[in-house]
Image (cartoon, rainbow, N blue to C red):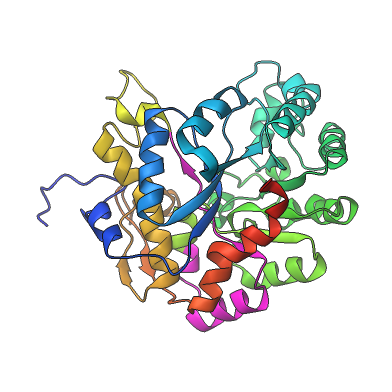
Amino acid sequence: MSDSTPRHPANLLQLDYLELSRNWPPPVPIVDVHTHLNGTEAVRCYRDVAAAYGITRTYSMTPLPQVETVREIMGDRVRFIATPDFMNPDRQFAHGKGFQERIKAFHQLGSRIVKFWAAPRGRDYGEECGDRHLLDLGHPQRRAVMDTAAELGMMFMTHIADPDTWFQTRYSDASFYGTKPQQYEPLERLLDIYTQPWIAAHMGGWPSNLGMLDGLLDRHENLYLDTSATKWMVRELSKQPREEFIAFLTRWKGRILFGSDIVTRDEHFAPPEENSDMPPQATSPEEAWDLYASRYWALRSLFESDYEGPSPIADPDLMLVDPTKYGPLDSPMLCGKAVPENLLQTVYHDAAMSLLESDQD
């Protein structure tokens, strides 16, 4: 490939993701427990990508008004995770009484999981409406929402912390955001109060520290982790020695679930808007296909293969920490772990089906 060849951030290696999928059946049907499906054309594209890569069931944080549209496209292959209305200008209502009402509506539509997003950057979101701690996991308003979800028998999903790279840069003001270890203090308290299952997204927010995750899982039998946030997982799990990673999956067999964090939008099928603040992730059906398929190709390569080479997905976090060394189209090494098939069967399928079987009605 010449240096002059245009490279898309989701396909730096110019792979034919569809052709690669045809000769690569998964060892078992895959359940993706963490996506964000939005749109119509985008969801149709995702449906085809998922079928190509062996994903037979998808759990999605779809906005409530879009649930029926997504269900019409995906059929029985989709389940929904209840989320608040982040676009509501009345943020106090949206994350309090409004979220309680929304959870009940999701529950009537079959949802049995509620997402509590508690990333440090939520402090900025809360500050803008006069309550910096609005999205903190232990906020009294959050507790009231959790009570509503618990009364309905729903399990919880949460986003705790963020990449180490962000704490080095975006969250360097620990007096505002807190340190990374401090993010886990309310989680551990709440795990003991709300004893239903919890799924901590993105390998619990600390894929670079398996020892810390060992402690969390050991102390809380109701805690599960998912592997979502593909760029983050590729960057950090590739660094883990294979033997240590396999030992971790073996030790916590049944409590690690596959997830991708794929986000679909119909905007991925159109040219970018003029004067847009953010460069688009995709601007055509072909680019959208590559965007969604790249996540499955990278995660499956990480878990199933012994591939060692650059990830096909650009990772801006590299440039965030060292802009003198990395550019916007640089990617980390992807080092496949060749996970044994019996463990893959659990991570890909059995753990999710066992945990979420109450959602299969």
Q: Is residue 309 left or right of residue 218?
A: left
What residue is drawn where x is 31% and y is 47%? 10
Q: Nearer the viewer, residue 246 or 324?
A: 246
Q: Residue 48: x, y in percent?
A: 36, 44
Number of labels in the image equals: 0
What residue occupies the far top of the structure in this picture?
Answer: 89
- Across and down, in percent, residue 21 comes to 30, 58
Q: Position of residue 99 (x, y in %)?
A: 75, 27
Quadrant hosting residue 164 = bottom right
Residue 243 included in the magenta stretch of the image: yes
Q: 47 above or below 277?
A: below
Q: Which residue is the extreme one toward the right?
A: 193
The image quadrant that residue 76 belongs to is top right
Image-based side of 266 in relation to 92, left or right:
left
Is 200 drawn above or below residue 254 in the view shown?
above
> Which residue extends farthest bottom?
243
Is 176 left, or right, of 265 in this rendering? right
Q: Quadrant of the C terminus?
A: top right
- In depth, the one of 199 and 342 nearer the eye is 342
Residue 65 visible? The answer is yes
- Residue at point 70% right, 27% down? 127
State the residue at coordinates (52%, 83%).
Answer: 243
- Residue range highlighted in magenta: 236-264
Nearest the eye: 81 or 168 = 81
Q: Is residue 116 magenta?
A: no
